[in-house]
């Protein structure tokens, strides 16, 4: 559990790999008065991640890390997190799996958002799995990150009804709308706000 220190906002690093739509919603949330966080750093494993542009737009430090050598990349990331006094990591469409060693160093301070109602449909291609399984509901989950993929303690979830004519793309769009609302809610919840 991350503790608020007086009225100071908690410094957050957001890890992305793609478009950064959850990053954008977290930045907007961080600008609200009630928000306990400030986004201090954007990290990506993809130097062409569209989401990195939000760093320029909102004047937030951004860094690209090549994960060819995961151990080396994680060492460099831990150093930059320390140097920037980061207290919380939000994974937002980050497509790399962090090592047990990295997770241990930030235990209880890494959140992830996943586009399914965990524990169902961990990993990739969740929307295809939901439709192929003829589920009535899908949704999204914000959870703490532990060393097992998409298995950490659940903070909160939001259900989305699966429509008869849904495709993975149409379902993904509706789930994403809820993700943008759920991530800020989860952050308020962990700070008991």
Image (cartoon, helix red, strand yellow):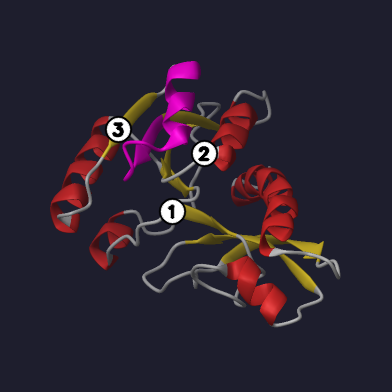
- Residue 57: % across, % down: 49, 17
Name the residue carrying label 3. Answer: 63
Name the residue carrying label 1. Answer: 110
User: In what element is the residue under mark 1?
Assistant: strand
> What residue is shown at x 31% (from left), y 45% (from top)?
45
Alpha carbons under labels 1 and 2: distance apart: 17 Å
Mark 2 burial class by Cα count in 10 Å: few <14, some 14-19, many 20+: many
- Residue 182: % across, % down: 69, 49
Q: Earlier in the sequence, mark 3 or mark 1?
A: 3
Alpha carbons under labels 2 and 3: distance apart: 14 Å
Q: Earlier in the sequence, mark 2 or mark 3?
A: 2
6 or 85, which is in the foreground?
85
Alpha carbons under labels 3 and 1: distance apart: 18 Å
Mark 3 burial class by Cα count in 10 Å: few <14, some 14-19, many 20+: some
User: In what element is the residue under mark 3?
Assistant: strand
Q: Is residue 92 magenta?
A: no
Q: Are marks 3 and 1 in contact (CB under 8 Å)?
A: no
* Relative to 82, 169 lies left or right: right
189 or 164, which is in the foreground?
164
Name the residue carrying label 2. Answer: 20
User: Which residues lie in the magenta part?
Assistant: 41-57
Closer to the camera: disc 3 or disc 1? 3
Q: Quadrant of residue 97?
A: bottom left
- Residue 48: % across, % down: 36, 36
């Amino acid at each position: 559990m991350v503790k608020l220190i007086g009225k100071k906002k908690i410094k957050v690093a957001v890890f992305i790999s793609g478009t950064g739509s959850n990053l954008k919603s977290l930045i907007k949330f961080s600008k609200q008065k009630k928000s306990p966080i400030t986004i201090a750093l954007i990290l990506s494993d993809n130097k062409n991640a569209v989401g990195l542009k939000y760093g320029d737009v909102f004047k937030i430090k951004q860094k690209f890390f090549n994960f060819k050598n995961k151990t080396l990349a994680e060492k460099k990331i831990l150093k930059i997190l320390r140097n920037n006094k980061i207290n919380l990591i939000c994974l937002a469409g980050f497509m790399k799996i962090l090592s047990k060693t990295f997770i241990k160093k930030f235990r209880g301070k890494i959140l992830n958002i996943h586009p399914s109602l965990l524990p169902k449909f961990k990993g990739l291609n969740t929307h295809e799995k939901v439709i192929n399984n003829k589920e009535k509901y899908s949704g999204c989950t914000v959870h703490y990150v532990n060393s097992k993929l998409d298995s950490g303690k659940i903070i909160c979830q939001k259900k989305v009804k699966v429509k008869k004519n849904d495709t993975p793309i149409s379902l993904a769009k509706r789930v994403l709308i809820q993700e943008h609302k759920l991530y800020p809610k989860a952050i308020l919840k962990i700070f008991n706000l």
